[in-house]
Image (cartoon, grey):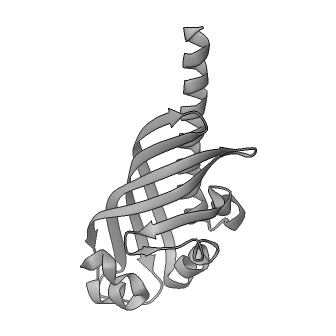
Amino acid sequence: MTDVMTDERTIDERAIIEVGMRYARSIDTRDQEKFMSCFTPDAAFGLPKLRSNLVLDQSLAFLDELFSATQHVTTQFQVEVSGDEASMTSYYIATHVWRKQLSDPLFVMGGFYEDSLIRTPDGWRIHDRLLVNVWVTGDRDAIAAAGMAELVQ
């Protein structure tokens, strides 16, 4: 019985981690369908003071308008499963290349995601994703002007 429970836990953990990796890939490839498949329809998403489910479907267009390329590296996944609910913490480094010419063409930030997930008929989905930004480099005025002032405060 213990081996079956361990196998199920491993399968769940792997599926949950895959959601985190799919999120990063979908942002960098601007794949709206895969991006939205990471979340429940009523998911909350964002920084501590800027959290909403209304911006999820506009997030990739916002990034594409500002940046010619992005690369999100996500690592150090820690997963806790409790029935049909789970939590995951993972670290990120996100590199963004500005579309407009700036003195510093890169905006790079690092921190971690705090996720709450729910098992759905379509698999695990993020119900709440909090971005906890720890550091940022780049043109702070451009970052603030792009509506991301909270990142540089």
Q: Which quarter of the figure is the N terminus placed in?
A: top right
Q: Is residue 91 left or right of 83 when viewed as pictured? A: left
Q: Which quarter of the figure is the C terminus placed in?
A: bottom left
Image point (63%, 64%), residue name: 42
Image point (60%, 76%), residue name: 54
x, y percent for residue 91: 37, 51
Image point (52%, 73%), residue name: 52
Image point (57%, 56%), residue name: 127
Q: Between residues 141 and 100, which one lies in front from this camera angle?
A: 141
x, y percent for residue 31: 67, 65
Q: Is residue 80 left or right of 3 when viewed as pictured? A: left
x, y percent for residue 146: 42, 87
Q: Residue furthest top?
A: 1
Q: Between residues 48 and 78, which one lies in front from this camera angle?
A: 48
x, y percent for residue 100: 44, 89
Q: Between residues 28 and 129, which one lies in front from this camera angle?
A: 129
Question: Relative to 116, does residue 134 appear above or below in the rendering?
Answer: below
Question: Relative to 108, does residue 88 appear above or below in the rendering?
Answer: above
